[in-house]
Amino acid sequence: MSTLTLAVRDSSTMLRRNLLHARRYPSATLNLLLTPVMMLLLFVYVFGDAMSAGLGGSGADRSDYVAYIVPGILLMTVGSTTFGAAVYMAMDMTEGVIARFRTMSIHRSSVLIGHVVGSVLQSVMSVVLVGAVGVAIGFCSTDAGVLEWLAALGLVTLFSLALTWTAVGMGLSSPNAEAASNSAMPLILLPLISSAFIPAETMPGWLQPIAEYQPFTPAIETLRGLLLGSEIGHNGWLAVTWCLGLTVLGYLWSKALFNRDPM
Amino acid sequence: MPSPVMPTSIGDGRRPCSPAISAVGLRKAYGDKTVLDGIDLCIPEGSVFALLGPNGAGKTTIVKILSTLIGADGGQAEVAGHNIATEPDGVRAAIGVTGQFSAVDGLITGEENMRLMADLNHLSKRKGKQVVAELLERFDLVEAAGKPVQSYSGGMKRRLDIAMTLVGGPRIIFLDEPTTGLDPRSRHNMWQIIRELVSDGVTVFLTTQYLEEADELADRIAVLHDGTIAAEGSADELKRTIPGGHIRLRFTDPSAYHSAATALREVQRDDEALALQLPSGGSQRELRSVLDWLDAAGIEADGLTVHTPDLDDVFFALTRNDAATPAEEAAR
């Protein structure tokens, strides 16, 4: 069997294992959706009127704020599910069966690839679910044609891939699930200091550059542009660069960590 | 085999060695704590080799190195004709490993675990199904196959663990303390399983802290002590290497004990248990002369037992100064 066939075959076996876990314990996945959905409802219904005042354009109201916040919440959902992926990876590494995989003649990285592909699928499904909640409370895409929808899906997938490889690295570098949930905290916190809830320009000056150039903001602005027709500008290539960079670095980091001798 | 063997090494010329497993000078240290300090092994195909040692002696480390889970710091080893450092995939294709802690996936069912192994061993769908069904049957897991492994008992997990190891039909199997923590019935089941494996011509590398287990199963036994192999040989050879046969007299009356202890000079006293030990090889003639002598001295013991050296004696003789320090314990 060629290396590639072996890699594909073993990785899909590992993916099946991950999906079995997810199917058997759906609550683990659904719990991760609670935060973004609560945030969405909280910001729209409790803060909505006040927040819409910050959107610029006079006469902006709650429905404008729904349109503004949903793209941000969708990518926050990606952060939240990949946070779960980091914890799950760390937990899985403490299982005896991982040692067994290491002594088998299989594609070495298949364990990781199974985790990543499983998590990206989960992530995209979660985005669809949270998106449905958004639509239910009044979000509608004003501008997107087929092409934009495809590009939006592509962006969400690529962003998930990038964050998942990073998360898997965080999981592998942690000795247990608790440590992983600490080191993966940025995946939850970064969306809070992005343009998800309020425009970056309205933040204090010292925070603006951080908010503007961290991975979430360019991705959120790009998604906003695709779905609502707002200006994308340099955010498009910034988002793609972040995604590709994190994917490559996360992959190399994870692979190196996994190939260390286990204790 | 002729002479009793105290530290044997490969290349002693007695065995034409076409070994399943061979090692020369394996070393491993964790930090400044040396766990293995030059291990030599030669294990012929189709035999059962038991590595015996107290907790923290480095048994698990040897298994981890030979099964390519971790690298050695020094020395060389070949498993199934493949160098563990340069051709780990060749080694992995030939071996099966059942570790000390069950290498099963607790979140999915027993059958799903087995199917996972079939796929990772690249069996065809039909062949995989057949092998999984056979093994579940053989290890009495058919009924439990649909339940999550988390709900299994210790013995069932261990059986599933071995069944998973066998899916790929390995020619060499590493069993790291396969019966630790099992109840007596499960332990005997496990022994039966190991014997069946051997009758199929599989080479078994077994680690255990139970001397009885090594005595029961192994063709050759090595005693691991302080990171080196203190002795190697068959159970009989090892027993012959040390003295230790004795007759034990037990008393209930302290005054009888004390008068006996003064009357018999060449004895080992155990004041707490009120017991005396006389050296003896355990033959009928020897026993009779001891009895006659006791009668003549007017000594009447409440209990008399004859003790021939067993692996326990060998083990204690070889590892006498050993008390595993916490550091050694942690290094496992």
Image: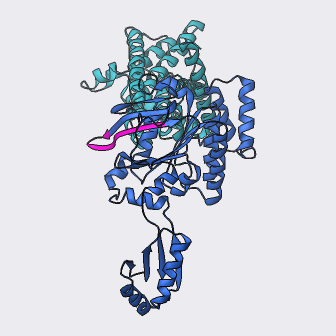
Q: Nearer the viewer, residue A15 or A84?
A: A15
- Location of residue B160 in the rendering, given as x and y in whole percent from the top left corner: 64, 43
Q: Which of A242 and B43 is in front in this view?
A: B43
Q: Is residue B235 visible?
A: yes
Indicate whether B94 appears above or below B249: above
Q: What stretch is highlighted in magenta?
A: B29-42
Indicate whether B61 appears above or below B262: above
- Location of residue B284 in the rendering, given as x and y in whole percent from the top left corner: 56, 72
Figure quadrant of the N terminus of chain A: top right
Task: Give residue A52's quadrant in the image.
Answer: top left
Q: Chain B is drawn in which colour?
A: blue
Residue at image location 65% in from the left, 58% down from the top: B185
Residue at image location 67% in from the left, 43% down from the top: B196
Task: Give residue A104's quadrant in the image.
Answer: top right
Q: Which of A15 and B165 is in front in this view?
A: B165
Q: How many marks?
A: 0
Q: Chain A is drawn in which colour?
A: cyan
Residue at image location 34% in from the left, 59% down from the top: B323
Magenta stretch: dominant secondary structure: strand
Residue A31 lies left or right of residue A213; in this view the side is right
- Location of residue B299 in the rendering, given as x and y in whole percent from the top left corner: 47, 89
Indicate whether A114 appears above or below B275: above
Q: Is residue A73 visible?
A: no
Which color scheme does this rendered protein use? by chain
- Location of residue A43 in the rendering, given as x and y in whole percent from the top left corner: 47, 33
Residue at image location 40% in from the left, 22% down from the top: A250
Residue B31 within the segment the image draws in magenta: yes
